[in-house]
Amino acid sequence: MHIVWDWNGTLLADLDHMVDAVNHCREAIGEPPVDSATYRQEHCLPIRRFHDRLCGRPVTDSEWATVQRIFTAQMAARLPPVRTGVAALLFRIAEQGHTQSLLSLTADAQLRREVAWTHLDIFFRRIDGRHEPSTLKSEALQRHLAALGEPDRRRVVLIGDTTDDAQAARACGVRAVLHTGGFEPPEKLRTAGVPIVDSLNAAARLAVEQPTRTSEQPTIPNIVPRPDTRRHR
């Protein structure tokens, strides 16, 4: 199997970072802060529409320029918070003979800086971030798969944390598994029509199942995160 991982909200436990960054943006345009529950409930793409929803009105072009500037500065200053056990999980998946790549709508240069800092880049056949502000996840996934050499899409699974991830996977003819610990609440994820799980470990276990069941039950590798002894600084 080939697993395409999402970054923010999936391999990273960065909901608090995102809420804080959004609140800095909102303060700059004269709007009150939001809490994490509101962030998750209103989260959507494209991001400008997300800010429209949080404000209860369309943000102006001038406000949007301010939001983009402040959000970019907030992201550039942060240290990416990798979920506990991620390095061990990615290692175990690779050890079982599966391949992995990373796709995000984070700006490509920022994504590459963050991944390099975490030292997780060794696990990915390819890393792709966003090159244009208006890029849709489905468009990015199509290009990502093409750059990978068009793997058999029946053997590709996207693991993410939003309904947008599920929609992108469906548009590209690949499976999706969503986990509940990211940017959108479980009740919203259930509308996506794909498997929903509560951990990355569970997501990985589902991802490596055969997409088409036969009379013989597939063997599911025992993917158990080992303690990550590396020290992130």
Image (cartoon, grey):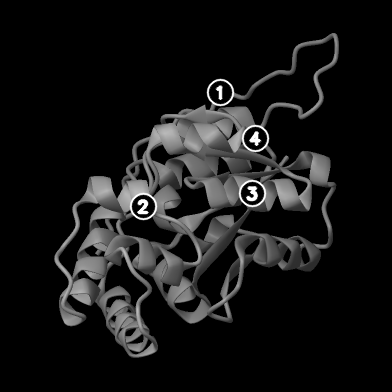
Q: Please, what secondary structure does the residue beneath circle 2 have?
A: helix
Alpha carbons under labels 3 and 1: distance apart: 29 Å
Residue at image coords 76%, 52% = 172
Q: Is residue 71 above or below residue 222?
A: below
Label located before the other in sequence (1 or 2): 2
Query: Mark 2 highlights which residue?
Result: 42
Q: In terms of depth relative to the viewer, which is nearer, 165 or 6?
A: 165
Q: Position of residue 161 (x, y in %)?
A: 47, 45
Query: Mark 3 highlights which residue?
Result: 167
Q: Position of residue 60 (x, y in %)?
A: 36, 83
Q: Position of residue 33 (x, y in %)?
A: 15, 63
Task: Categorize mark 1 by other alpha carbons within 10 Å: few (<14), some (14-19), many (20+).
Answer: few
Alpha carbons under labels 4 and 3: distance apart: 28 Å
Query: Mark 4 highlights which residue?
Result: 96
Label located before the other in sequence (3 or 1): 3
Give, as a three-letter code, the residue at label 2.
Answer: Glu
Q: In terms of depth relative to the viewer, which is nearer, 14 or 149?
A: 14
Give, as a three-letter code, the residue at label 1.
Answer: Asn
